[in-house]
Image: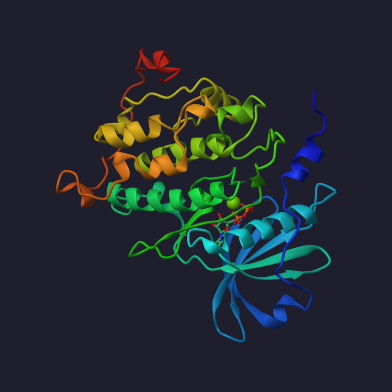
Amino acid sequence: HGRTDSTQSHSALLSEIRTPIKTEPFSDLYSLIPGKELGRGKFAVVKKCVEKRTGREYAAKFLRKRRKGQDCRLEIIHEIAVLELATASPRVISLHQVYETASEMILVLEYAAGGEIFNQCVAERDEAFTEGDVKRLMRQILEGVVFLHDNSVVHLDLKPQNILLTRESPLGDIKIVDFGLSRMVSGGQELREIMGTPEYVAPEILNYEPISTATDMWSIGVLAYVMLTGTSPFLGDDKQETFLNISQINISYTEEELVGLGASPINFMKSLLLKDPQARASAKECLNHPWLQLQPQEGEGLEKPLPIPVPPLSLEKGEEEESLETEE
Ligand code: ADP
Ligand code: MG
C-alpha cells in the first residue's frame, strides 16, 4: 500500500526552468488594464496587462505561493517548466516572463483575446459553435494534446474553461492553458489521484487507479459532448451524483441533446468515454477518426448550425438508459 503519494507526485513534477525569475516590481514594467480581470481560480487571478516598453498585451497569472498553509512554489515551477517544454506547440499558450514577489509568482502569458471556449459552448444557438467549428477546434485541441502526450505530459484538467481562443469573431485558434494539475507520466512510477473538475474527471481518478495519457482522453470525450450539445454529460445535482454518473458511465447516446447529430461524432465520443483507459482512443487515433477528416461529407454540413436542444417537456425518463452502462 502506498502512502508515498507526495514522493510519487513530486517525481511527476519538473523542477528545472530556464526562464529567468524577475524580482523587480511587475508594475514598473507592465500596466494592468483597470477592470480587466480575465479569470480567477482557487489560487490564481488572471489580469490583462500591457508591457510598457512594447505596448503589447499580455495575460498576467498571479499565483499565491502559500495555499492552505503549504508552500507551493515547486508546483508553480513545474507549471512554468511545462509551459517551457510546450513552447514548440502553437496549441499551448506561450510564456513571456516570470516575476516573483514575497507572496506570489506572476506568469506573464500570451493574451488569448477570444476567451474561454466555455462561453460559446453554453451560448444561445446563434452564437454557439457550428459542427464545422467544433471539428476544427477539436482537431487543434488534439494536436496540442498529441504534443503533450508525446512529451509525457498529462494535463489532467482539460475542460472548456482551460481552452481559450485567440479571437472570438471571426473564430480564431485554440490555446491550451492551466498546467496547474499537469504531471509527467514517464518512468515506471505510478501516479494516482489528482482531482480535476468533477464533471470532467475520468473513472480511474475516482477509483484511485493509475493515471495515464488516457485520463486526458476521457476529458476530451466529455469536452466533445459539451462543445456539440452545450450540456455536460455526467453532471448531476451534486458532486456525489456526478461521481456516480461517471463511475457507472451513466450516459445515453439517445438523449435529445444528441438528436440531429450524425453517427460519426457520437462514435467519436463513444471511443473515448470508456471505463477501461486502455480501450480509449489515443489523441493520434482521434485525429484519424472519420469525424475529423476535413472533406465536407454531405456538401452542406459544415455551416449548418447544431440542433437546438429541446427543453425537457415532461418528466418521463428513458427506461432504457441503465442498459448502456458499459459500452463496448
Ligand atoms: P486556474 O488555475 O486558477 O484555473 P487558469 O490558468 O485556468 O487558472 O486561468 C484562469 C482563467 O483566466 C482561465 O479560465 C481564463 O478564463 C483566463 N485566462 C488564463 N490565461 C489566459 C490568457 N493567457 N489569456 C486570456 N485569458 C486567460
Ligand atoms: Mg483553470
Q: Nearer the viewer, residue 211 or 228?
A: 211
User: Which quarter of the figure has residue 77?
Assistant: bottom right
Q: Position of residue 219 (x, y in %)?
A: 50, 38
At a point 33% along the width and 32% down the height, the residue shown is: 266
Q: Nearer the viewer, residue 305 or 299?
A: 299
Tell me: residue 286, above or below residue 243. below
Q: How many marks?
A: 0
Q: Nearer the viewer, residue 263 or 8?
A: 8
Of the 4 image quadrants, the one containing the N terminus is top right
Tell me: residue 204, above or below residue 34. above
Say whether residue 191 is left or right of residue 323: right
Of the 4 image quadrants, the one containing the C terminus is top left
At a point 63% along the width and 79% down the height, the residue shown is: 31
Residue 236 in sight: no
> Furthest-front residue in view?
187
At a point 71% along the width and 67% down the height, the residue shown is: 18
Q: Position of residue 201 (x, y in %)?
A: 57, 35
Q: Nearer the viewer, residue 63 or 134?
A: 134
Q: Position of residue 16 (x, y in %)?
A: 75, 60
Q: Position of residue 10 (x, y in %)?
A: 77, 45
> Furthest-left residue in view?
299
Residue 74 in sight: yes
Say whether residue 283 is left or right of residue 134: right
User: Which quarter of the figure has residue 140?
Assistant: bottom left
